[in-house]
Image: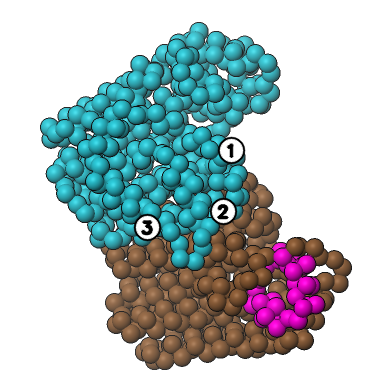
Chain colours: A cyan, B brown
Amino acid sequence: MGVNENVQKPLDHLSAALAPEMEAVNRLIRERMSSRHAPRIPEVTAHLIEAGGKRLRPMLTLAAAKLLGYDGPYHIHFAASVEFIHTATLLHDDVVDESSQRRGRPTANLLWDNKSSVLVGDYLFARSFQLMVEPDNMRALEILANASATIAEGEVLQLTAAQDLQTDEDVYLQIVRGKTAALFSAATEVGGVVAAGSPEQVKALFDYGDALGIAFQIVDDLLDYGGVTQTIGKNVGDDFRERKLTLPVIKAIAAADAEERAFWVRTIEHGDQRDGDLEQALRLMADHGAMEAARRDALDWAGRAKTALTALPDHPIRAMLMDLADFVVSRVA
Amino acid sequence: MGVNENVQKPLDHLSAALAPEMEAVNRLIRERMSSRHAPRIPEVTAHLIEAGGKRLRPMLTLAAAKLLGYDGPYHIHFAASVEFIHTATLLHDDVVDESSQRRGRPTANLLWDNKSSVLVGDYLFARSFQLMVEPDNMRALEILANASATIAEGEVLQLTAAQDLQTDEDVYLQIVRGKTAALFSAATEVGGVVAAGSPEQVKALFDYGDALGIAFQIVDDLLDYGGVTQTIGKNVGDDFRERKLTLPVIKAIAAADAEERAFWVRTIEHGDQRDGDLEQALRLMADHGAMEAARRDALDWAGRAKTALTALPDHPIRAMLMDLADFVVSRVA
């Protein structure tokens, strides 16, 4: 979700370590995204799935299962399920956000239409549940069903919280857990469950995915404002223009005096934005150390992710997951 | 979907026979449509769920289970799941069709926005899977996951088949099975599975739901053109204006000469519709006996539904399901 998946290097190591499994996941995805009756479905899906996403989430499932010594075959099904849920969510997100670009290409809602994006998203969501049924593991199914509900709830919450200056860090965290972390934590947890990990191991895997997802989203929100050093990143200020209440803005608003508050009310709540407002927003966030504080939060969540891993067996995959947590925040470290 | 659920009388009998169970279903629906974090969700859902739908689909699940002597508790969960899937589909349909009215009230996409309809639909879909997990019945879960995929596939197929004069009766049947009959047949089949019916009984229940759903949709498509006698029904000609290829039109096109074909190409394929075109379409359908032939198809499917029931135990509920099949087609009989 709106996250720049620029987590190349540790993912390359994971990709290499999990190459045969990822190959099987990709095969299963291609097989199941087809439709006997409606060729529009694989067209739309291929546009997104072949667009070179990093497959981060299915990789987390494979990594978690392998870390606990599981050798298959059902981590493949759950990994593909996770990617289908992710793809379905992207299709619906682009309709909701009226986006025109995703992964550097025009979005499906632009290439076809919103109708196709809504319905193909529904199809992939249903396909993900079909995939989940096959391994006959009700606990794993429950985890992914719960994650799906949490994702949708987080998205609705984001919709209603948008432009509402009452949105505080607790609400922000709920939204982030929903829209990003829920699928990360389900991906790792389900890998642990399919591997028949102990309750402690499964809990540790959940905690890792949860903290990693939160760190990931905070970093993305920071990069939207150019990052702490304002050197990296995509177009600066998209979130400001879309009046999204992300962590650095929430922190700046919490510390605002009356005059500053009036600025946020005008620009975010009323959407009355003028030349120089983005620069002023950046200045206010800098004055209150909001970017720096959000950066510390991201590092803190990355630290929690690594701490969670200590409860898991010493294994090359574990070291890669440690690196991944560092790498996610390296863009703002 | 898009179906006028005017199936009052036999549904009243079923409602009375299943009153305590329906009460439990309604309780469960109200409980599960809530959201701790996002009040928008129950607002949107209540708008639709409290709008007085007939609860036909969950009733079919309860009836199937009871007919096989099942006394609970899990038919309640599956019945509520079925209604959640149906409601999610309605929310997404209204976005796809850009509808402004449903059950005589403004649609959710009009009252709130398309975003809310998409995301709340996703939420209800996820909630339906959470509900399905609880009874710990993987076979029942599989049936509903498969139905969900078939529904979405049917909707995409309808989207791509719209305005395409190549659409023949086979494609029509696939679309109808997807958008309407799949949930009817899943509703009855799952009731049989939860009641631990024999394979023959479960198959009979599936066949009943499938045939009932097809009859239901053909009747709805006929009524859109005013029915065979053109006395009943809603606004005549909505499907024509939306250039939908429903059964009577498909039959008229199959029998068209060159000049008539040019009419259908202009009005349906090119969407160039003028005053008097609807009347001309009705005339062509009458000339070729297309309405009458579609009506015979509907009666035939109702007959198949009743035949399927003969494999099931003699039971007051069975008699009501027989009546229901007759009643569905009574609007055109």
**Label 2 amino acid?**
Ser
Q: Nearer the viewer, residue A129 or B113?
A: A129
Mark toward the viewer: 3 or 2: 3
Mark toward the viewer: 1 or 3: 3
Q: Quadrant of the C terminus of chain A?
A: top left
**Label 1 amino acid?**
Ser
Give the labeled residue for mark 1.
Answer: A100
Residue lying at the far front of the rendered structure: B258
Marked residue nearer the N-terminal end (3 or 2):
3
- Residue A116, numbered label: 2
Query: Is residue A194 visible in this depiction of the protein?
Result: yes
Marked residue nearer the N-terminal end (1 or 2):
1
SS for callout 1? loop
CA gap between label 1 and label 3 equals 28 Å
Residues at discs 1 and 2 both on one chain? yes
Q: Is residue A147 above or below residue A166?
A: below
Q: Quadrant of residue A129?
A: bottom left
